[in-house]
Image (spheres, helix red, strand yellow):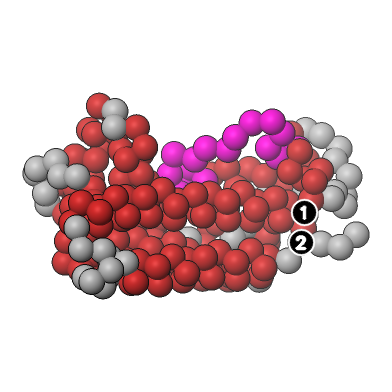
């Protein structure tokens, strides 16, 4: 049975990140294209949702493909005698079924991966702590943009204070667009670097 090609996942994800980075350069980075400040806020906050969605699609595909390479660890975890060579569709059905995988942090993702993937085919442990911290921070921003709840606001305040020493609750777009959107480009780079780090098992 033909096995999954992890390189394709990383090539696709990194290309998508590069395309979105170029989109931001053309829009918020060029004053004559988008002139209204509030419009720039809307673009950058929408971009947070888009980048996080790309990451989620990438990690799910990566989990499935890594499982497709070797499902022995998952067999032991579930206490099932799974076939040695499962198709990608079967891997997806066993791993996800009809539910939705939702990870609270990169460490949560790494913990899940250790339960279902063999060490030789687990790229998630290669994500460095500093990279993981940036991804976790952007997810705090993403959750606030998505829900505008008191809980997400509390976490955002805490993140602003610990990561940027900001005591005032500012709109995420305002924080991300400051200093020529330097902070947001750092977050985008963290996603890109996570893929590069994970390539270590390929």
Q: Quadrant of residue 94?
A: top right
104 or 184, which is in the foreground? Answer: 184
Q: Quadrant of the N terminus?
A: bottom right
Q: Residues within 10 Å of mark 2 (few under 14, many from 20)?
A: some
- N-terminal label among 2 and 1: 2
1 or 129, which is in the foreground? Answer: 1
122 or 97, which is in the foreground? Answer: 97
Q: Is residue 13 a member of the stretch shown in magenta?
A: no
Residue 163 seen by the camera: no
How far from the left and from the top, in percent, is residue 73?
73, 46
139 or 76, which is in the foreground? Answer: 139
Left or right, 92 with reference to 30? right
How far from the left and from the top, in percent, is residue 186?
31, 65
Tell me: residue 114, above or below residue 126.
Answer: above
For the record, the magenta segment spans 94-110
Residue occupying the point 23% across, 71% down? 32
Residue 4, numbered label: 2
Residue occupying the point 80% across, 46% down? 89
Q: Are marks 2 and 1 in contact (CB under 8 Å)?
A: yes
Residue 68, numbered label: 1
Left or right, 80 with reference to 55? right
Could you tell me how far apart the alpha carbons at marks 2 and 1 are, in whole angstroms?
6 Å
Tell me: residue 111, above or below residue 196.
Answer: above
Q: Residue furthest left?
A: 167
Q: Is residue 98 a member of the stretch shown in magenta?
A: yes
């Amino acid at each position: 049975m033909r096995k999954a090609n992890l390189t394709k996942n990383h090539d696709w994800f990194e290309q998508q990140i590069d395309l979105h980075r170029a989109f931001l350069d053309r829009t918020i980075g060029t004053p004559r294209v988008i002139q209204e400040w509030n419009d720039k806020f809307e673009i950058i906050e929408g971009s947070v949702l888009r980048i996080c969605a790309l990451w989620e699609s990438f990690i799910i595909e990566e989990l499935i493909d890594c499982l497709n390479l070797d499902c022995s660890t998952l067999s032991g975890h579930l206490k099932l005698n799974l076939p040695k060579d499962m198709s990608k569709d079967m891997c997806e059905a066993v791993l996800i079924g009809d539910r939705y995988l939702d990870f609270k942090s990169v460490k949560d993702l790494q913990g899940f991966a250790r339960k279902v993937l063999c060490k030789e085919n687990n790229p998630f442990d290669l994500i460095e702590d500093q990279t993981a911290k940036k991804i976790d921070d952007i997810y705090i921003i993403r959750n606030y943009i998505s829900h505008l709840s008191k809980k997400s606001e509390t976490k955002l305040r805490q993140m602003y204070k610990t990561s940027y020493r900001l005591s005032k609750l500012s709109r995420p777009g305002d924080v991300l667009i400051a200093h020529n959107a330097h902070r947001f480009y750092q977050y985008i780079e963290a996603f890109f670097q996570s893929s590069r780090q994970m390539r270590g098992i390929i």
